[in-house]
Image (spheres, helix red, strand yellow):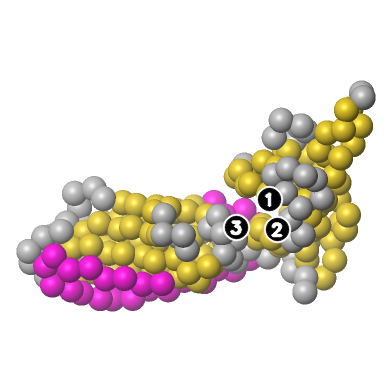
Amino acid sequence: MKTLLIIPTLAISMVVGNLATADETRVASGFRGKAVHTRTLVLDRGQLVLVGVEGDHATDLDLYVKGPDGETVARDEDETDTCLVKFTAKSPGTFLVHVVNRGDAPNRYDFLTFTPTMRGKLVVHNSTDAAANLRINGLLWRIPAHAERFEVLVPTGRLITELVDYESAKQWSVSANETFALSLTYRLRGWDEVPATAAIVASNPRR
């Protein structure tokens, strides 16, 4: 499914896979020269987000997104007042979105956020003694050792996981509004025990 959003001259086009709905927020705003506007986004781990800004072309606007740990996770700082960033929340929590007016004159702008609804959830239980690198639909996640419940929002339908350095890619299926549970355990490879993945609950109602 393709979703096309238009902010005056800013076109956001993205293939979002098997996602039935999305949350969109559009706000008209304005501020004086050399000012900063800050907004907050509360996200779950795995949530995909697009943030766009379209100004009135009076000054240069820059856009920055900072995660719960204060690190910058996305930015657009070209010399225009049209900004667009896309990122996936690597951890749950509050993200800060900063719009910066680099010029001396005021600038009126439209601010848009687009968050596709992720209708599936992957829960990973790591019973091994070491952290694991698990690639989920192409994105790399670090699963802590002995993690009881590491949750990642995922689209419904086909789910591809790869336990880096130990297993090649595996394909699973996730149903809408359901949770897919994956266990990281040890299995024998020759005389050695190595990490491996196994589905412990193929799909159960999300709680």
Quick check: marks 2 and 1 in contact, CB under 8 Å? yes
Which amino acid is tagged 1?
A: Pro
Is residue 25 rendered magenta in the image? Answer: yes
Which amino acid is tagged 3?
A: Gly
Residue receiving disc 3: 46
Q: Going by the picture, which residue comes out furthest to the left?
A: 104
- Density class for disc 2 (Cα within 10 Å; few <14, some 14-19, many ≥20) is some
Residue under the point 72% across and 49% down: 145
Residue receiving disc 1: 144
Residue under the point 68% across and 65% down: 119
Residue under the point 47% across and 63% down: 68
Which amino acid is tagged 2?
A: Phe
Residue receiving disc 2: 150
Q: Secondary structure at mark 3?
A: loop
- For the residue pair 50 and 142, the one nearer the viewer reads as 142
Q: Which label sits in the foreground, 3 or 1?
A: 1
Magenta residues, as a range? 15-40
> Mainly helix, strand or loop, the magenta region?
strand
Residue under the point 48% across and 69% down: 94
Relative to 199, is 32 above or below?
below
Q: Which label sits in the foreground, 2 or 1?
A: 1
Image spot of residue 80 (x, y percent): 20, 52
Q: Earlier in the sequence, mark 2 or mark 1?
A: 1
Is residue 186 rendered magenta in the image? Answer: no
Q: Earlier in the sequence, mark 2 or mark 3?
A: 3
**Left or right: 104 in relation to 99:** left
Q: Secondary structure at mark 2?
A: strand
Q: Earlier in the sequence, mark 3 or mark 1?
A: 3
Q: Going by the picture, which residue comes out furthest to the top?
A: 190
- Density class for disc 1 (Cα within 10 Å; few <14, some 14-19, many ≥20) is some
Task: Specify whether residue 195 is in view.
Answer: yes
Image spot of residue 121 (x, y percent): 71, 62
